[in-house]
Image (cartoon, grey):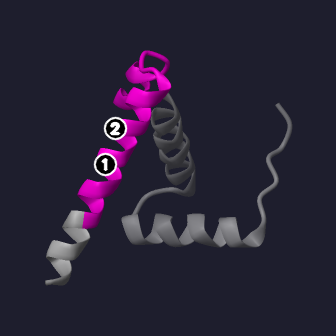
Amino acid sequence: MGNLVLDNKVLTTISTLAERLKTTKEDIVKKAVENYEKKLNKKNPLMSFAGILDEEEADNILSAIYNNRQNKDQENFL
């Protein structure tokens, strides 16, 4: 693998985090990559429903979610 080139903003962020967390820059990069990989591999539980609902059922569920959110917003406003 070749050299990795990072812009100054990223390098500054890595340095700042390393200083703040009292660790090495290498450790910051390793942990960031590990966390990013975990995030990408995390399965969304809602995806298990993908494709099993017909269009009308899906629309009804989305409508119920939307209405519930509106009700919560109104309750919080009061």
Q: Which residue is mark 2?
A: 61
Residue 48 highlighted magenta (yes or no): yes
Image location (x, y in percent) of residue 77: 20, 82
Q: Residue furthest front?
A: 56
What's the amino acid at mark 2? Ile
Residue 43 marker: none
**Quarter occupied by residue 22:** bottom left
Residue 29 highlighted magenta (yes or no): no
Q: Is residue 64 left or right of residue 4?
A: left
Q: Which residue is mark 1?
A: 65
Q: Range of the magenta residues?
A: 43-70
Examine the rendering and report whether any part of residue 43 can be seen. no
Element type at mark 1: helix
Asked if 52 appears above or below 45 in the picture, the reply is above
**Residue at image x 38%, y 64%?**
21
Examine the rendering and report whether any part of residue 6 can be seen. yes
